[in-house]
Amino acid sequence: MILALSLLLPLLIGAALGFAGGVFGIGGGIIAIPVMTGLFGMDQKLAQGTALVMMVPNLSIALWRYCQRQPLPKLRTALLVLCAVSATTITAHYASSLASSELRRYFGAFLLWLAIHSLWSLRKGRSRWSVTLPERLIPLVGLIGGACQGLISIGGGIITPPILVSLFRQTQAMAQGFAIALVMPSSIVALLTFANAGWVDWRMGILFALGGALTISHGVRLAHRLPERRLRVAFALMLLATALWMLGHG
């Protein structure tokens, strides 16, 4: 009975995380890390490495589903990914040597700032001083997203949509599609780095991944049905809740 529960619980949690990951275009990792640290008592770095095991297959499914509904420009996406992987390769090595408490503070503070910024931009609307950058510069966002991805494992997926929405005037759904494309290869690089350092619980990660694979397509479907503003508000509130969790348990 205990063995069955130890297998069923991660599968159910993985299913919930997979659905949320499909809605927000993040593969579930942003929510998986506080769940692993808070519910299962994992070390911060071990939780980040284990979350990557779930994210890689979930992101692959999500990217396929997003592209089915809203194809991404191939050349621009390829350049975005190249910039992201290059930045992730460098910062992931740095992150694996940080103390877990320090990494948790980085993670929580980063999310808190991003959540407040996203909610404030919705409140004030588009001002006359707002900047709109040309779409040809979108690949450069990969440098920022990739650096965050290597540092906190899931940073690329959450910082990319707000940048693309606010500075490049992309829709939230399109921005989340770009974010998935950026995060998927970067997650593979980060996973290999964390695994090499011994910071991965493969059993837990695989169970989370199996659960998430069953539900992530449903989350993507919901994301494309939600009104633009409602999806942006939901994304920002998800960031805020996760930030407060991480800082409160730091």
Image (cartoon, rainbow, N blue to C red):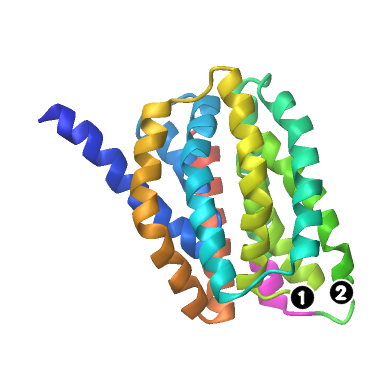
* Of 31 and 58, the residue lying toward us: 58
Note whether residue 95 is visible: yes
Badges 1 and 2: C-beta atoms under 8 Å apart? yes
Mark 2 surroundings: few (<14), some (14-19) or many (≥20) residues within 10 A = few
Please, what secondary structure does the residue beneath circle 2 have? loop
Query: In the displayed structure, would residue 105 be above or below residue 71?
Result: above
Query: In the displayed structure, would residue 195 be above or below residue 131?
Result: above
Q: Whole-Å distance between the Cαs marked 1 and 2?
A: 7 Å
**Residue 197: which quarter of the image?**
top right
According to the image, label 2 marks what residue?
132
Q: Which mark is residue 169?
A: 1
Q: Which residues are magenta?
A: 119-126
Q: Amino acid at mark 1?
A: Arg
Q: Is residue 66 magenta?
A: no
Mark 1 surroundings: few (<14), some (14-19) or many (≥20) residues within 10 A = some
Give the farthest residue toward the left.
1
Q: Position of residue 181 (x, y in %)?
A: 65, 56
* Of 85 and 133, the residue lying toward us: 85
